[in-house]
Image: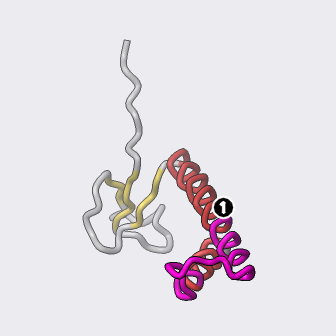
């Protein structure tokens, strides 16, 4: 009985061009060989990364909201200044695009 091979977590497309399917030099490889190689990951890996990103976004959003509420009530710690809240706000805007 033969063992089923596990696919690599990522592969790279080399010598990419617009019509890469008919281009004779286009290859796929397990290793990145050139700076312009295009990385592809398994759908399962992509889905796991999306779920982790969403979990972190929700955590950051909750923390930001709690800090803003504490600031409105004058209860925000002196260790949390406006620059921290600005960076959290910017990060939230970036991941919700």
User: Given the current orientation, which residue lies at the most extreme left position?
Assistant: 33
Crowd band around label 1 with a 10 angstrom C-alpha radius: few (<14), some (14–19), many (20+): few
Q: Residue 69: horizontal and vertical position, in percent?
A: 73, 75
Give the residues in magenta: 62-85
Residue at 50 percent of width and 48 percent of height: 45
Residue at 62 percent of width and 61 percent of height: 59
Residue marked by disc 1: 58
As helix, strand or loop, the secondary structure at mark 1 comes to helix
Query: What is the magenta segment's predominant secondary structure?
Result: helix
Q: Residue 26: horizontal and vertical position, in percent?
A: 37, 63
- Between 40 and 45, the one nearer to me in the picture: 45
User: Given the current orientation, which residue lies at the most extreme top position?
Assistant: 1
Location of the N terminus by quadrant is: top left
Residue at 66 percent of width and 77 percent of height: 75
Residue at 66 percent of width and 61 percent of height: 58
Left or right, 30 with reference to 72: left
Location of the C terminus by quadrant is: bottom right
Where is 14 relative to 83, above or below? above
Residue 2 within the magenta-colored segment of the rendering: no
């Amino acid at each position: 009985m033969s063992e089923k091979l596990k696919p690599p977590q990522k592969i790279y497309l080399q010598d990419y061009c617009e019509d890469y399917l008919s281009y004779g030099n286009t290859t796929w490889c397990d290793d990145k060989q050139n700076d312009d190689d295009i990385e592809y990951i398994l759908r399962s890996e992509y889905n796991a990364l999306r779920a982790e990103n969403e979990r972190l976004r929700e955590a950051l959003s909750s923390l930001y909201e709690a800090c803003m509420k504490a600031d409105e009530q004058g209860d925000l710690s002196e260790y949390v200044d406006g620059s921290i809240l600005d960076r959290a706000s910017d990060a939230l805007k970036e991941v919700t695009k």
